[in-house]
Amino acid sequence: MQDIPKCDGCIHVIHRGEKCYCGCAFGFALHKIWPPNPDINGIRQNHPELVARDLEKYVPKLTTRRILKERGVNKWLKNRRLIIQLKDRIKQEIKDLETKKKQLNGIKRAKTSGRIEALIDIRQQLRAICHSNRDTDFPHQVSDFGECSILPEDFPKRPSANWLLRKERKRIKDAHNMHQ
């Protein structure tokens, strides 16, 4: 293992798998010191309890849970999970139809092919949405959802899994280039 950095008030280092924590003499609870600055894509997500734990130092867990529920965040976290499950079901249905299609002929085979094509289009669109950028900022004004709520006009019938992510990166790069 690499040398683990210690903060100035470190008493001892505790190893938990790949992450290391120090017991700090400054009176803080154990705080993570390794790995430094984790990538946003490596952080667990999609559960209101994770948010409640993150804010526990500042807001009681029950309050955070209530606010998330009242604001509809729980609903959308649940719906995201359901969308992922739907995407997986559609994938299985495509596989089943492709197997069935081999046994058919004529008009039934053509209809099955059309259904498969439509399902593939839908699944690819769901997949692109599920793989969109995690690092999304909403405008600070509640009445303005900005680009967060608009499906791009050029959203293809069969986008790649990271189509929205690439589009967002391009938008950020273009905005950065305009300011230079």
Image (cartoon, helix red, strand yellow):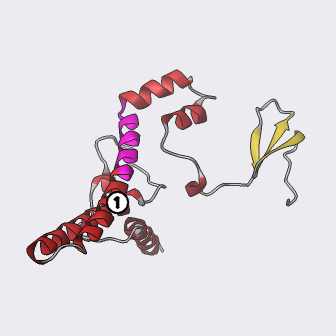
> Outermost residue toward the right?
11
In the image, 89 versus 16, the foreground residue is: 89
| Residue that mark 1 sits on | 92
As displayed, is residue 18 above or below residue 29? below
Residue 44 in picture, x, y percent from top left: 57, 47
Please give the name of the residue rendered at 60% of the width and 29% of the height, measured from the top-left corner. 56
Quarter of the image with the N terminus is bottom right
Outermost residue, bottom direction?
106
Which percent across, then down, holds residue 35? 73, 54
Could you tell me if residue 121 is visible in this image? yes
- Report the side of 170 relative to 24 (left or right): left
Disc 1 marks which amino acid? Answer: Gln
Q: What element carries label 1?
A: helix
Overall secondary structure of the magenta section: helix
Residue 128: name its quadrant.
bottom left
Q: In this view, does 134 lie to the left or right of 84?
A: right
Residue drawn at point x = 85 percent, y = 53 percent: 5
- What residue do we see at 40% from left, 46% from top? 81
- Point out the stretch of residues depicted in magenta: 71-85
Q: Where is residue 179 in the image (x, y as percent from the top left)?
A: 45, 71
Q: Is residue 125 visible?
A: no
